Amino acid sequence: MLAIKLAFKNLLGAGLRTWLNVIVLSFAFVLIIFYNGMIDGWNRQARNDTQNWEIGSGQFWHPAYDRFDPYTIAESNAVISKDIQDLIDDDKLTPVLIRQATLYPQGRLQSVLIKGVDPNQKVLELPTADIQNSQNKYAAIIGKQMAKSTKLNVGDKVLMRWRDKNGTFDAHEIEIVSIFKCDVPTVDNGNIYLDIKTLQDMTTLQDQATMLVAHREYENTKLEGWEHKNLGFLLAEFDKIIESKKGSGLILQSILLILAMLAIFDTQVLSIFRRQKEIGTYIALGLTRAKVVGIFTVEGAAHSILAAIVGAIYGVPLFIYLSKNGIYYGTSAQDAGMNIPMAETLYPYYSVGLVITSIIIVVVAATIVSYLPARKISKMKPTQALKGKIQ
Amino acid sequence: MDIIKITDLVKKFPVGNGHFTALNQISLTFGEGEFAGFVGPSGSGKTTLLNIIGSLDTPTEGNAIVLDKSISELSHKQSAKLRNQHIGFIFQTYNLLPVYTVYENVEFALLLQNLSGSVRKKAVLEALEWVGLTDKIKSKPAQLSGGESQRVAIARAMVKKPKIVLADEPTANLDSKNSHNILQTMLKLNEELKTTFIFATHDEKVMKYLKRKISLADGKVVGDEMI
Ligand SMILES: Nc1ncnc2c1ncn2[C@@H]1O[C@H](COP(=O)(O)OP(=O)(O)OP(=O)(O)O)[C@@H](O)[C@H]1O
Ligand SMILES: [Mg+2]
């Protein structure tokens, strides 16, 4: 208590020097929170979008299916059992049948994944109802990026060729009935969505599906004959990206933190050198050396408390503004050719945990760099300190 | 009863390869309520002896027993406790804490003792009354004159009612009027509270107030007279 009161009085008494340190340190604070808040916001947003558009609470795959190996697709389908159909009718699951096909937009050739989806599904945000609204059996919906790369517009018809279950080629014209906007590239790029019934007919795979997507509120992870894939598995790649972004941010944050710590360290060394007489006086008044070391350590560490306050003064309004209005990136990551889920406007997310962790890191770091020079006090001779003669 | 008993005390400081003997075979005793002073030329060892009595330094040889405690045998913690409870210091340069007010400077000495806030407040105000500074309790040291600063230092040394007050050249930075003023204050406290005062000085004005004058020269006691 004594040390804390004295620390703040001394710090505020030191004037400009204190404020310079505090401002540098507050930058470190704000930057750490800003950057991590941005990454956390992106993470939340992207996970949320991916769950809503593609994976729900998880997927049940046909055991042979491997999303990175297109050759598995032809063998990765099974009949939907009666029990599972009940779950589908109950909106707990929705089936997806996946096949490969080739599209011939304007005479060019493009291989695509056809995904047969249930137009009545309520599991994913995918606007599958649009398929049903059309009278055309071969009605298809595609994403904005896909529309751009194939130069297809609503109402366009395009020739598609595929193999049925026996490997025999077949072809038909499909009609684009709507174009949706989705920030999850694996939903958009290279995908064409048809009515699952149509696709089953086209491939003579009656009542079959490649996977079942679970509703976000459906928690069951066991279905006979299907392999459950949880979020950890399905989002593993994205999680890696987040980790690496956090890692690269760490470098800049560390540099700023180290600069701030050097400034505090320097201030501490100087103040211990300059205030020897004060140190001697404390000892003469009956403070133990350990207590005096404590006073100086707290004083240095208190920079971080002031920095938190100063940082809050300009940081809080900034963070509130950003989390309300988001950070607009102009083009989405997909437009920029990146295959990661990211929206055009990113809403940073500042969690209590983030703020507390940042405060702990900065306070602990400041305490350590304040303690190191202060330790010297315990080796001082009080008589010399009182004379102010220690070099 | 002796509150300070020094026997055959030697203090050597390392200098270069050898050492310098600052105090040589000192033997002295002090009783309760003394108003004594070490006098002698510069470098005679006054400050060194005062520091050892105040447990800020330790003897090289011999013994210094202060309030039944042998200074050489005290741990850092024990000597801190001895100073905090029983010894007050007054310095030539006042050594007030610049960021604290007069009140807080005086209170500081009590903060280490587990006293209640009201007991502390009473003691601080009483100490400031002794030195006649009750009207300056909110001032900062920078706003005080030298004489006022030294009176705050006296209040700080006295507030815990120590057995011993050690004053190293307390008047060296003061004019004659202020010197007399603080000496009178200290003499009064010595008489009222039976506190033992020991000075280190070469100020004639101080010597006039001393009841016992111990002369040092080259680290030896060369005179010890009661006045
Ligand atoms: N830490 C030290 N190292 C070496 N020599 C020292 C040290 N402290 C004091 N001395 C020497 O011991 C002698 C006594 O010093 P001390 O400070 O006690 O003198 P003093 O009587 O108080 O002098 P003054 O009247 O000038 O204050 C001096 O010669 C001084 O140089
Ligand atoms: Mg001296």
Image: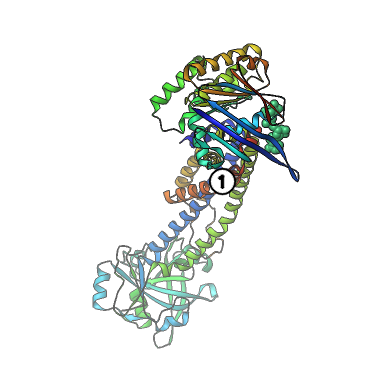
Which residue carries the number 1 mark? Answer: A371
Q: Nearer the viewer, residue B79 or B223?
A: B223
Quadrant containing the N terminus of chain A is: top left
Q: Is residue A27 above or below residue A76?
A: above
Q: Quadrant of residue B5?
A: top right
* Crowd around label 1: few <14 · some 14–19 · many ≥20 (10 Å): many
User: Most extreme residue toward the top, as rendered?
Assistant: B177
Please state the horizontal and vertical placement of residue B127, each as a whole percent of the image. Answer: 48, 20
Q: Quadrant of residue A293?
A: top right
Q: Is there any visible trace of residue B188 in the rendered image?
A: yes
Q: How is the image coloured?
A: rainbow
Residue drawn at 62 percent across, 37 percent down: A271
- Amino acid type, residue under disc 1 in the picture: Tyr
**What chain does badge 1 belong to?**
A
Residue drawn at 47 percent across, 73 percent down: A158
Quarter holding ligand 2: top right
Label 1 sits on a secondary structure element that is helix
Q: Nearer the viewer, residue B219 or B157?
A: B219
Please state the horizontal and vertical placement of residue A200, each as a whole percent of the image. Answer: 35, 79
Q: Is residue A247 above or below residue B106?
A: below
- Taking A250 as reference, is A157 left or right? left
Residue drawn at 54 percent across, 64 percent down: A338
